[in-house]
Image: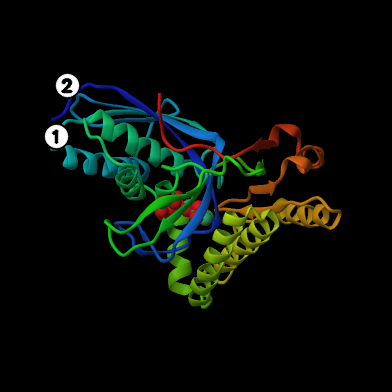
Amino acid sequence: MTTDKQEITARAHTNIALVKYWGKKDDNLIIPQTDSISLTLADFYTDTTVAFDDQLSADSLKIDNKPIFDKEALKVQKVLDLVRNLAKINTYAKVSSTNHVPMAAGLASSASGFAALAAAASRAAGLDLSDTDLSRLARQGSGSASRSVFGGFVQWHSGNDNETSFATQIDSAQNWDIKVVALIIKKSRKKHSSTQAMRESVETSPYYPVWRQVVAKDLKTITHAIRTHDFDLLGSTSELNAMRMHALTLSSDPAFTYFNGQTIELLEKVKELRANNVNCYATVDAGPNIKVLCQSKDLNQIITVFSQLIGPENVIATEPGSGIQYL
Ligand code: 2P0
């Protein structure tokens, strides 16, 4: 049974991967080559409102008040079609999404966006899906969105098909002293889509088979670090995993990097701080921006140092966030 015109708003937070997802084995279903582990962040999120309306003659899709088209719209329609199929309706939807995330700058607005869409659209269609089903649904919009259904530390189990590929929470991170400082170097849209870049890595990097082994080992280490509250083990493993992921783009044909000059300078600064007993570690996603992992005791010093370098408006501190919320 469905309730047309019911308007539902859901909020989902972005996540940063500590063990990265980089490569698919099924492009359409978005089944990854490997598992990944992430931390959901409190201050970067997307609010999405969905209503199915039988007066509409097409889906009406807006992000940050602007209509979306082409590839972006097709991905949203793919998730809406899955929801329509599950709810056995054929009504079009009005979707309006607001990002509290700098879009497509490696801060994973697609993760929060598709998780919020899956939650709002399924409820608006009258469905009451489990978190596992929401994770499967969000995954088919964007892989990393499967993890944003949950709060805290989350593992996306690669699986082999739609049924077996979903995320679960490892730990809510509520009893963890962990902070994340985002260093915003560039807010504009990235040139290389991660979808395309990861395909090139799988197909052309000679190091891809080794990456799978790296991930298998890092998953075990990070899980242990989460269970034992070992911040330094968690940070050092995450940083090395990120650098090894970026080695895949540098070793693809054609080779490229998401880093710019400032990324490299700021990564050096993180190392320098560490040499001076400031416990901090860096991770970088599909863009030049850096996320610094640290603990409360070092937070103010880290904010001060990076504010002097790139301006206080580009240094945003946050902490672990929660899973899907309905507003
Ligand atoms: C991650 N990234 O694990 C990795 C690390 C970026 C670097 O997931 O193709 O937007 O839509 O599944 O989820 C970004 O890729 O890619 C991403 P698709 P997605 O967070």
Q: Earlier in the sequence, mark 1 or mark 2?
A: 2
> At 42% from the left edge and 25% from the top edge, which residue is drawn?
65
Residue 55 badge: 2
Does the beta carbon at disc 2 come under 8 Å from ligand 1? no
| Numbered disc in front, either 1 or 2 | 1
- Residue 4, horizontal then vertical, whole percent: 18, 24
Does residue 293 appear in the picture of this structure? yes
Question: Which residue corresponds to mark 1?
Answer: 89
Classify 10 Å Cα crowding around label 2: few (below 14), some (14-19), many (20 and above). few
In this rendering, the answer to whether 246 lies above or below 281 is below
Q: In the image, residue 112 lies at what x, y percent?
A: 45, 39
Quarter holding the N terminus? top left
Q: Nearer the viewer, residue 118 or 156?
A: 156
Way the structure is coloured: rainbow
> Residue 225 appears in which quarter of the rendering?
bottom right
Q: In the rendered image of this protein, does residue 294 appear above or below residue 223?
A: above
Between the C-alphas of marks 1 and 2, the distance is 14 Å
Describe residue 167's horizontal placement relative to residue 259 as left or right: left
Contact between marks 1 and 2 (CB within 8 A): the answer is no
Q: Tag on residue 288?
A: none
Disc 2 marks which amino acid?
Gln
Question: SS at mark 1?
Answer: loop
Tell me where residue 158 appears, x and y as whole percent.
38, 61
Crowding at mark 1 (Cα within 10 Å: few <14, some 14-19, many 20+): some
Q: Is residue 15 left or right of residue 308?
A: left
Q: Disc 2 on helix, strand or loop?
A: loop
Q: What amino acid is labelled 1 in the image?
A: Ile
* Quadrant, the C terminus: top left
Going 16% across and 24% down the picture, which residue do you hit?
54
Q: Is residue 29 left or right of residue 236?
A: left
